[in-house]
């Protein structure tokens, strides 16, 4: 069979061979070989992905080992509810993705498109919720070490750009684009375009569903102890909030802050928060002072020539005997650095996944896949499961420490 | 016997110092290390000579015209292959054992070692002898185990003394240590030679030229100390010298001599000395050329533009602040790379440096007499930090 | 000078010459047919041109370094900025050599051309991905160029923190470049693994694969497993520089040693990415030009895989002085010694292959012999560095520089050039001048040794590496080394011109100029677009019994014993029933 196929020599048009179906690339002999190659390829790619994330998991392990209390403390700034809902959304998307693979094998084209659209919508919801999380933290200055500017007295910075709007901007543009596409193709009556644009419009809009969901949960989030504590601790002038609300572009956001402050009052009474509050209070008063004192002590030690040397080992000599004080930029910053790196890179993977899923969706509308050729759906499915799996690890490691 | 081998292999033999294989053996590690090096080299030759010999022998012996058939087509011989796979392993195990044992000695600091602190910075060294004595030269006592506790103020450096066969990286953010026991004391050069060099140095108006004289300004021959971890522009100039004293008393005498400005030394001269010794000259020129930091030429009394756009007057306070907290006011066009000298210079030192900088400027206002500086009198000379 | 003769009556099997429309170089015309080609052979040729340019550039930088070191105060670069320029030049030399030349040299340039042909496949499994990885390579090169034209780069190719996070040179452009090149490398590796796993034609069992394929397979495993870690490390470094994430920078409570661990976790296996394919090339070269079956095929094949796996466990030996705990250091030292065993096995096997062979001292064979000589030195001096106590003295001195140049240049580069000479007739269908080829080999060999042998002495005497200026007592050795480098440059230029000359004036190459038995010699030179007209019949890659020299046409042909139409023996009688 192999000999038969290669006769054509120089020209390599796809149709040069009668038993070479259009989906079979010229250098493969059989669809099975092509499928196996693709499958092995994607598995290898997943291995590289795991190692890629492995680097960050290592960094996480090292720094958590060095400063467990920083991780515990800072983890409380993450809203577990949002994390949990995102986990659920991703798990559901994995289900629809697996279903999509099945549909492509059984040649249920309509259902395949639907499943892919569902997966995409879940991805968008995930990103919407993430947008809320990120913008909220940026607003409070909970940033990587170099930019960390969280101030327990004034958790909500006044002014500053409206991060949420900036994050949403590309998605708004995309949504407008898909709606325009839909309208134009409806007017023109191009069936293929309509069939593509319809699910994609739903997908694009589901991002805002995610934003709405995130906003709702964030405002009702009594889980965020530390944030709440900080609110209660600092003087909570309503004027500050007015400033905040002024540049919130959608109405939901306005109540969220008020709801938040009331949640803060509730959290005050919750005795479980007391030690956290204590921490913040002590930080609030003497962060700068403490550093200064430490520096002075170190300085005079060195000046007198009596170093506090530890003779046992190099590794033990690293400066890691941190006092239980975690809200300084260089300490808390590291947690947020790792948080942003890990979730950020994960979000980039979601975006990449969305791109290939859109490509699949268009191909599925074109009915490209059949029981002999469903490789691409299968490969993307594997990729999607991996992205999902990584989140399943990220969620407890970042949100559920305690 | 093995230790002799490398010498024998050196290209022209030991009489040509330029081609010697090793630096002088000046610590307890050196002998073990060179011996081990010799053993390894010997083993290498044991393998290499037959391999290279056979390689060329086969190439000539079995060279045949095109088309000739090989005499044998034997595909494998498991027994032979197993032998040459396993046999070298024993050699390797032995080498590993020897290396690891010697390494443990090198990393295990004996109790009661003499301690010296080392601060590495771009691009220089500060040795801390305690009691507020800092000096770029490393001075030790012969046959006295000495522990260096090292830290870096900026990037990674590595302290390397070839004569001691000792090396250790200095990683910022942690303390690193190393130890060694010098076995050879530095010679002292004759008084005439020293006098000649001192005279020359005074006349030339430059700093002490170690390279030219090959001894220190106190008349000691020295060993080289290098930085071996790449650290930027002047990495190759981040060198200092190691002097090994005969006795503890001699070392103490030296420490006393360098610890502070003597009563007969003017602040300007002392400032100049500090400028050379403490690494200022690596970044700040006197002739107006731009190095990593701004030049001292005509700096004092001028207005200085900062990175932030502000302008400040280059006065005593500015000098003091720039030494203690260099990142506070960085001059425009320069990166904030200067390490802090907080706790490393006494008030008198800083005062002396300021005086020295003043001498480098033509626009030093005469109206500001030095009397504003309380530490100007001699009592401050022996003072250490609070 | 020929001793072979074709047995009379034997059938000759020779594919002849390709027609114009079959030849992959000429079957389609125009620049676009190259830019968008999916043909692995064309991509291989483009890689070959690319890496050669990168090598020429980095080689010139190397000469600049050596010239600068002619005098203790620096002879080449003058003025206030001399040290900075020197630092930038050695950084760029290292970075370009490692990321743009050595890593893609054999796997991407030779590998792309040879893997499918040797395997008997029509192309690699993912031709588009293959082209994509070539363009990623180009983009990576552009980023390096940007770093060069921007504010330079002076971190050393290792990008050690915190130096790389504080210097004001274009670290980000360079790390982005390395990051992108990493992906190029990953895709190439992934492609080869899949190709070798799934595209083998019937009859091509694992143990009928030429050893070059085994080596490529092992290399690809490393590329796929190690490079992602480099990717994330560089990303974190970029984040550290832009946002100060405080993972590597001690100023924000980070740990620089963590960076070193991450970096060397990739970069040590990367050393094997560089040398393993060279092993594969040499295995084939030695066997073909000795016209003798490779000795200990399985040992060589397995040792490639063993090196690939062990290579992941030894990264710590770059950090013996960096401040790991003593126990960790000792463990890494022990693991380091284990990795030397498989390399030793290969050297012994190559020697045994030459023993009682029929050696033709062609240009590729000369390079292969140089390789064994130089690599053995490189490998053995590794013992000095793997032994802990001596490493404390030699670490970061010229001894290390000499050691890894013996392995990377004396090893990989020489094997690469040997491989190019070996497969040049196959790639371009032209024969080059043997005289100049061998001359280039001799000059390279002498020049190389003159350059780097003195550096062993320099290192032993305590000359630290990466020094722009040095103490005068080291001068004579440095001068020697510089003259060697110039000689080496001459040798490489001769090699380059010998090859380029042959492109235009060279004789037409036969299908099998060396007498090889692997599949690539069974198709025409240069191969047709589809590599094989019929699915090749796969035989033993090292069976030279039926390869005969045809002195009339100056080519080797494979022969088959005369076929008789009538079977020799008739069954004496029809079996009962």
Image (cartoon, coloured by chain):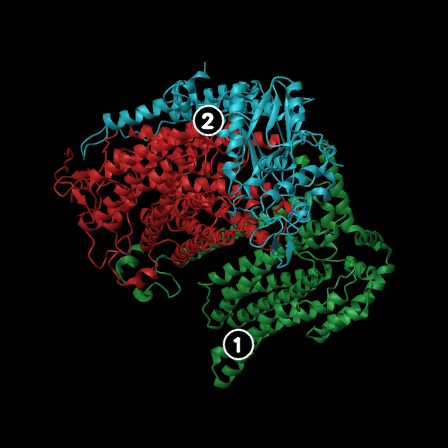
Chain colours: A green, B cyan, C red
x%, y% of residue C85? 44, 46
Secondary structure, mark 1, is helix
- Residue position for label 2: C461
Q: In which chain is the residue bearing label 1?
A: A
Residue extending farthest to the front is: B367
Query: In the rendered structure, are the residues bearing label 2 and label 1 in contact, judged by CB atoms less than 8 Å apart?
Result: no
- Residue shown at 48%/84% (left/top)? A189
- Residue position for label 1: A197
Q: Is residue A293 visible?
A: yes
In the image, B365: left or right of A36? right
In the image, B384: left or right of B13? right
Q: Quadrant of the N terminus of chain A?
A: bottom left
Q: Nearer the viewer, residue A41 or B29?
A: B29
- Residue shown at 34%/39% (left/top)? C415
Q: Is residue B88 above or below residue C311?
A: above
x%, y% of residue B53? 31, 23
Secondary structure, mark 2, is loop
């Amino acid at each position: 069979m192999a000999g038969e196929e290669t006769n054509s020599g120089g020209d390599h048009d796809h149709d040069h061979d009668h038993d070479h179906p259009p989906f079979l690339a010229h250098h493969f002999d059989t669809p099975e070989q092509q499928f196996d190659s693709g499958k092995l390829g994607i598995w290898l790619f997943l291995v590289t992905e795991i190692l890629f994330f492995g680097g960050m998991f290592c960094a996480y392990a090292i720094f958590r080992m060095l400063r467990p209390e920083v991780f515990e403390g800072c983890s409380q700034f993450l809203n577990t509810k949002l994390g949990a809902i995102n986990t659920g959304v991703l798990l559901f998307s994995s289900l629809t993705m697996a279903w999509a693979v099945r549909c492509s094998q059984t040649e249920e084209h309509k259902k395949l498109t639907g499943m892919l659209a569902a997966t995409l919508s879940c991805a968008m919801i995930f990103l919407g919720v993430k947008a809320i999380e990120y913008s909220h933290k940026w607003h409070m200055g909970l940033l990587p070490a170099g930019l960390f500017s969280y101030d327990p007295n004034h958790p909500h910075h006044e002014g500053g750009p409206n991060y949420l709007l900036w994050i949403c901007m590309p998605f708004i543009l995309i949504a407008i684009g898909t709606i325009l596409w839909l309208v134009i193709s409806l007017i023109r009556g191009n069936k293929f375009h309509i069939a593509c644009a319809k699910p994609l419009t739903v997908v694009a809009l589901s991002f805002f569903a995610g934003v709405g969901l995130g906003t709702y949960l964030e405002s009702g989030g009594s889980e965020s102890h530390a944030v709440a504590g900080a609110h209660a601790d600092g003087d909570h002038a309503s004027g500050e909030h007015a400033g905040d609300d002024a540049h919130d572009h959608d109405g939901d956001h306005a109540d969220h802050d008020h709801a938040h402050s009331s949640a803060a009052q509730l959290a005050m009474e919750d005795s479980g928060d007391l030690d956290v509050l204590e921490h913040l209070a002590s930080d609030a008063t003497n962060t700068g002072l403490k550093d200064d004192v430490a520096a002075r002590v170190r300085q005079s030690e060195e000046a007198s020539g009596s170093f506090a040397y530890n003779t046992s080992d190099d590794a033990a000599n690293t400066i890691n005997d941190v006092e239980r004080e975690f809200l300084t930029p260089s300490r808390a910053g590291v947690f947020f650095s790792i948080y942003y790196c890990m979730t950020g890179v994960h979000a980039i993977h979601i975006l990449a996944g969305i791109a290939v899923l859109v490509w699949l969706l268009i191909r599925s509308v074109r009915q490209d896949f059949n029981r002999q050729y469903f490789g691409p759906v299968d490969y993307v499915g594997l990729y999607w499961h991996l992205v999902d799996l990584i989140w399943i690890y990220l969620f407890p490691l970042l949100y559920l420490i305690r | 016997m093995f230790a002799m081998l490398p010498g024998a292999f050196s290209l022209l033999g030991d009489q040509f110092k330029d081609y010697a294989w090793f630096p002088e053996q000046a610590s307890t590690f050196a002998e073990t290390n060179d011996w081990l090096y010799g053993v390894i080299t010997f083993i290498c030759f044991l393998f290499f000579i037959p391999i290279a010999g056979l390689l060329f022998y086969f190439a000539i012996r079995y060279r045949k015209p095109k088309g000739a058939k090989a005499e044998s087509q034997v595909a494998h011989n498991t027994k032979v292959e197993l032998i040459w796979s396993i046999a070298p392993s024993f050699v390797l195990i032995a080498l590993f054992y020897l290396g690891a044992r010697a390494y443990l000695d090198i990393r295990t600091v004996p109790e009661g070692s003499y301690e010296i602190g080392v601060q590495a910075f771009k691009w220089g060294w500060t040795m801390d002898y305690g009691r507020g004595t800092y000096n770029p030269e490393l001075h030790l006592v012969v046959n006295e185990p000495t522990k260096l506790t090292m830290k870096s103020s900026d990037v990674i450096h590595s302290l390397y003394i070839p004569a001691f066969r000792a090396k250790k990286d200095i990683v910022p953010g942690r303390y690193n240590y190393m130890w060694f026991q010098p076995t050879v004391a530095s010679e002292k050069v004759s008084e005439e030679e020293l006098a000649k060099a001192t005279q020359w140095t005074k006349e030339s108006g430059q700093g002490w030229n170690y390279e030219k004289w090959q001894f220190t300004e106190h008349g000691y021959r020295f060993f080289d100390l290098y930085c071996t971890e790449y650290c930027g522009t002047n990495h190759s100039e981040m060198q200092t010298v190691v002097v090994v004293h005969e006795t503890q008393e001699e070392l103490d005498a030296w420490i006393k001599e360098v610890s502070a400005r003597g009563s007969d030394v003017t602040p300007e001269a002392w400032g100049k000395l500090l400028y050379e010794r403490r690494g200022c000259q690596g970044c700040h020129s006197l002739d107006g050329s731009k190095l990593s930091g701004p030049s001292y030429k005509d700096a004092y009394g001028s207005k200085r533009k900062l990175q932030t756009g502000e302008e400040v007057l280059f006065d005593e306070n500015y000098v003091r602040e720039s030494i203690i907290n260099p990142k506070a006011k960085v001059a425009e066009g320069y990166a904030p790379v200067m390490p802090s000298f907080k706790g490393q210079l006494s008030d008198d030192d800083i005062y002396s440096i300021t005086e020295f900088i003043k001498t480098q400027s033509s626009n030093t206002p005469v109206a500001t007499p030095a009397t504003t500086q309380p530490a100007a009198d001699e009592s401050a000379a022996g003072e250490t930090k609070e | 000078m020929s001793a072979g003769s074709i047995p009379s009556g034997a059938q000759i099997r020779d594919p002849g010459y390709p027609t114009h429309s079959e030849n992959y170089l000429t079957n389609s015309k125009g620049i676009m047919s190259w830019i968008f080609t999916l043909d692995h052979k064309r991509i291989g040729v483009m890689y070959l041109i690319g890496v050669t340019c990168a090598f020429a550039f980095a080689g010139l930088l190397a000469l600049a370094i050596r010239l600068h070191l002619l005098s203790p105060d620096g002879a080449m670069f003058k003025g206030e900025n001399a040290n900075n320029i020197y630092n930038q030049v050695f950084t760029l030399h290292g970075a370009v050599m490692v990321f743009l030349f050595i890593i893609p040299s054999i796997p991407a340039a030779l590998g792309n051309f040879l893997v499918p042909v040797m395997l008997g496949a029509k192309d690699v499994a993912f031709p588009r991905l293959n082209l994509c990885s070539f363009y990623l390579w180009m983009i990576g090169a552009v980023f390096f160029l940007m770093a060069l034209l921007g504010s330079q780069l002076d971190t050393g190719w290792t990008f050690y923190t915190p130096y790389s996070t504080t210097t004001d040179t274009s670290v980000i452009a360079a790390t982005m470049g390395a990051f992108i090149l990493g992906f190029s490398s990953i895709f190439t590796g992934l492609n080869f693994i899949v190709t070798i796993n799934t595209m083998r034609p019937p009859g091509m069992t694992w143990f009928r694969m030429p050893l070059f394929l085994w080596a490529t397979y092992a290399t690809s495993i490393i590329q796929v497993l190690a490079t992602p870690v480099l990717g994330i490390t560089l990303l974190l470094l970029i984040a550290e520089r832009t946002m100060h994430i405080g993972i590597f920078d001690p100023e924000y409570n980070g740990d620089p040693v963590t960076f070193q661990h991450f970096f060397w976790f990739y970069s040590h296996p990367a050393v094997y990415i560089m040398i393993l394919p060279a092993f594969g090339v040499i295995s084939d070269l030695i066997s073909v030009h000795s016209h003798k079956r490779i000795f200990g095929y399985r040992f060589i094949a397995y040792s490639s895989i063993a090196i690939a796996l062990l290579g992941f466990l030894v990264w710590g030996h770059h950090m013996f002085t960096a401040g790991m705990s003593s126990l960790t250091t000792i463990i890494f030292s022990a693991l380091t010694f284990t990795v030397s065993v498989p390399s030793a096995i290969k050297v012994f096997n190559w020697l045994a292959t030459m023993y009682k062979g029929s050696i033709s001292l062609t240009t590729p064979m000369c390079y292969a012999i140089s390789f064994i000589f130089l690599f053995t030195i490189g490998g053995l001096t590794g013992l000095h560095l793997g032994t802990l106590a001596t490493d404390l003295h030699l670490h970061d001195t010229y001894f290390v520089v000499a050691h890894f140049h013996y392995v990377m240049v004396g090893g990989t580069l020489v094997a690469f050039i040997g491989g190019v000479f070996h497969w040049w007739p196959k790639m371009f269908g032209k024969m080059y001048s043997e005289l100049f080829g061998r001359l280039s080999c001799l000059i390279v060999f002498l020049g190389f040794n003159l350059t780097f042998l003195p550096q062993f002495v320099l290192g032993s005497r305590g000359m630290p590496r990466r020094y722009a200026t040095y103490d005068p007592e080291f001068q004579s050795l440095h001068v020697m080394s510089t003259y060697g480098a110039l000689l080496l440059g001459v040798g490489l230029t001769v090699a380059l011109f010998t090859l380029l000359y042959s492109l235009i004036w060279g004789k037409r190459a036969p299908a099998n100029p060396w007498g090889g038995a692997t599949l690539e010699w069974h198709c025409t030179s240069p191969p047709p677009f589809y590599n094989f007209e019929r699915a090749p019949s796969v035989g033993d890659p090292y069976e030279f019994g039926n390869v005969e020299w045809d002195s009339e046409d100056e080519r080797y042909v494979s022969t088959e014993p005369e076929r008789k139409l009538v079977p020799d023996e008739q069954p004496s009688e029809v079996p009962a029933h």
